[in-house]
Image (cartoon, rainbow, N blue to C red):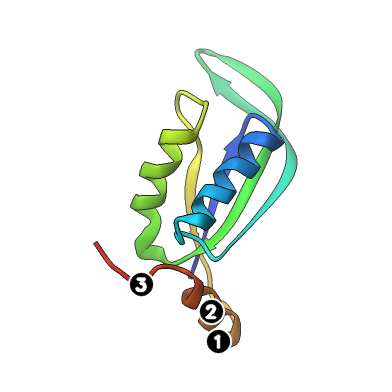
Amino acid sequence: MAFIYITCKGNKEAKNISRKLLEKKLVACASTFPIESSYWWKGKIENSREYAILAKTKKWVFREIEKEVKKWHSYEIPCISMINSTDIKDYSRWAEGEIKNVRK
């Protein structure tokens, strides 16, 4: 099981990406929440309000998620990160049952 962390310019974009990942059965669940980010961009420190997605998936689906998110995302270089996790077996079974089972 893994969490995919994605930052977006706003709630609408975060919900759109979450919905598309769910419809493609690439994730079992996606949570969105507002965040305030500070980061280096083109030689200076920027501050912005963003929305983050925390999606639950299988580790091996990460590259496909990355490819799909880049199609829909407005950022030049979107943050798409995978965080490995250990979960209770019941939750893992449920989540894995919701994600497509065909490996590429």
- Above or below: residue 40 compared with residue 1: above
Outermost residue on the bottom side: it is: 90
| Residue drawn at the location 34% of the way across and 51% of the way down | 63
Mark 3 residue type? Asn
Question: Pointers 2 and 1 in contact (CB under 8 A)?
Answer: yes
Mark 1 residue type? Lys
Q: Earlier in the sequence, mark 3 or mark 1?
A: 1
| Residue drawn at the location 50% of the way across and 72% of the way down | 98
| Residue drawn at the location 59% of the way across and 38% of the way down | 7
| Residue drawn at the location 54% of the way across and 19% of the way down | 41
Local packing at callout 2 (Cα closer than 10 Å; few below 14, some 14-19, many 20+) is some
Instruction: For mark 2, give the secondary structure.
Output: helix
- Above or below: residue 3 compared with residue 37: below
Residue 55, x across and y down, in percent:
57, 57
Depth check: 15 or 88 in front? 15
From the image, tell me which residue sits under label 1. 89
From the image, tell me which residue sits under label 3. 101
Q: Dividing the picture into quarters, in which one does residue 69 lie?
A: top left
